[in-house]
Amino acid sequence: MNLNTKGNTEVGRFNWSMLIIISLASIVMGIYRDGIAVLFPFLQRDFDLSRGELGLYISFLYITSSFVSIYTGRLVDLKGSKWGMIFGVSFVGVFLILHAVAPNFFILLVLAAILGIGLSINVPAANKGIMEIFPAKWRSTATGIWSTSFPIGGLLAAAFLPVLGMLIGWRKTIALPGVLALICALLILMFYQEKKREKNYFDKNNTKDISFWKTIKQLLNNIDIIILCIYASFLGAATGTIATHFTLFLYLDYGFTERIAGIGFAVTQLGSIIGKPLWGLICDKLLKANKRKTFLLIGIIFFLITLIIGLFLKDLNPSFTIILVLAFLMGGTGRGWQGLFYASIPEIVKEKQVGTAMGLVLIFLRLGVLFVPPVFGYIADYRNSYDLSWLLLGSSFFLASIFQYLFYIKMHNSK
C-alpha cells in the first residue's frame, strides 16, 4: 500500500527528530502501561490482595480504552496528531500522580479506568504522526522503530521501579512516570511540528466527509477483518496476562524477591523488543511474507513455553538462567507479535478505512486484556499456583493461531 505516491521520498534530520519526540512520549507511556505490574508485589502486600484482585487493575485500565478507541482514533483524524499526543500524555501524567495519593485499591481501579482514555488516544495519535511526517517508503521503518517504544519503557520500568519501590515506596515511585509524562507533553507542545507533514498523505486521508457508520458497516461485512478481530482478542489475552501476572508468578510461585521478579519481567520485555522486528524479518525473508504461517509459528512456540511452565518447570527445579530464557521466549512470542499484526490491517481494508479498522480491532484486542487477566489470576488463587492458568492460556492461544491460519481468507500477502 502506498499512501504517498507523489510527495518527497527523502527523509532528514527533521523527520528523525519528530520520530524521537513521538517515541520518547511512547516510552514514558510504556513505563506505566507495560511496567506497572512490577509494582504489583508492593500493592499485594500493602492492600492484602489476591492474584485475581490484582488482575482487575489491568482490566479496569482497559475498560474505557476498549470502548472509546474507535472514537478516539477518529477524533485524532479530525483534531490532529499533535493535539492527540499532548492530550493523551498529559492526561496519563495527571492521573498517575493521583495514583500516589489513592487511599485504597478501589480508588486505584477507578483512576486506572479513567486513565485508559489517555492511553486510547496516544497510539492512534503517534501512528498518525508517523504517517504524516514520513514519506511512504520510510513509514515501515519508522513504525518499526516506534513500536519498540512501549516495551523499552516496560524494560526501564522493570529495571528501576522495583528498586525505587524498595527505597522510596511504591507511591512516590508510581508518581515518577506521571511527572515524566507531563514533561513529555511540554516537549511535544514546544518542539513537535505538524506544518511539514506529508501534504499528499493529509489530503488523501482527510476523513471529515466520510460517513463513520458507513465505514463501520463496510468493515463488519469484511470477513478478513472480523477474523482478525477474533484473533486479536486472544493476542490481547496473552499480552495482558503476561504484563499482569509474570512478575507475580515469579514472586509468589518461586519466592523471588520483588527485585529479582522484576528482572524476570524485564527479560520478557527484552524478548518483546527483539521479537517485534525479528518476526517481521522471519515473515518477509523466510516465510515469503505469509503472515498466517508466521502467526501459526508464534502460536506453536508460545504453547510449548506454557506447556513447560505449566507441567514440568517446578519438578525440574530449574536455575534462574533457564527461567530467564523462558521469560525471553515468552516475551518474544506472547508480546512480540504487535508489529506483524498491525501491519496486517492495511492489507485487508480500503485505504480510507485504516484508522477506523485499527480502532475496531483494538476494541477486540483490549477485550482480551480486559477479561482474561482476572480469570487467569482467580484460577491461580483456586489452585494456589499458576500452573493450570499458563496451560489454559497457551492452549487457547495455540487454537486461535490454528483458527486464523485455516480461516483467514487470502490475506493479500499470498499473492
Image (cartoon, rainbow, N blue to C red):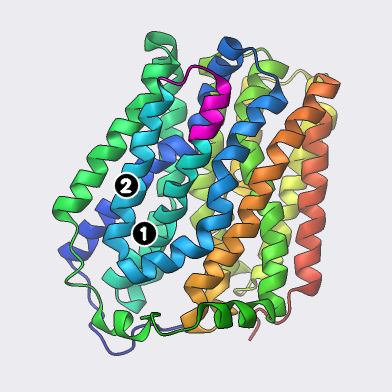
**Residue 105 inside the magenta-drawn segment:** yes
Query: Residue 410's image quarter?
Result: bottom right
The structure residue drawn at horizontal position 66% and vertical position 31%, both measured from the top left corner, is 55
Going by the image, does 414 lie left or right of 14?
right
Residue 377 placement (x, y as % from top left): 73, 29
Residue 341 is at least partly visible in this image: yes
Residue 406 placement (x, y as % from top left): 81, 71
Going by the image, does 326 lie left or right of 1?
right
Sequence-first tag of 2 and 1: 2
Q: Amino acid at mark 2?
A: Ala
Going by the image, does 6 lie left or right of 54?
left
Could you say which is closer to the camera, residue 350 or residue 4? 350
Residues at circles 2 and 1 in contact by the CB criterion of under 8 Å: yes
- The residue carrying mark 2 is 25
Residue 126: assigned label: 1
Residue 412 is at least partly visible in this image: no
The structure residue drawn at horizontal position 42% and vertical position 61%, both measured from the top left corner, is 124
Q: Secondary structure at mark 2?
A: helix
Residue 67 placement (x, y as % from top left): 58, 55
Provide the residue span drawn in magenta.
101-111
The quadrant of the rendering that contains the C terminus is bottom right
The structure residue drawn at horizontal position 55% and vertical position 48%, both measured from the top left corner, is 64
Could you say which is closer to the camera, residue 105 or residue 231? 105
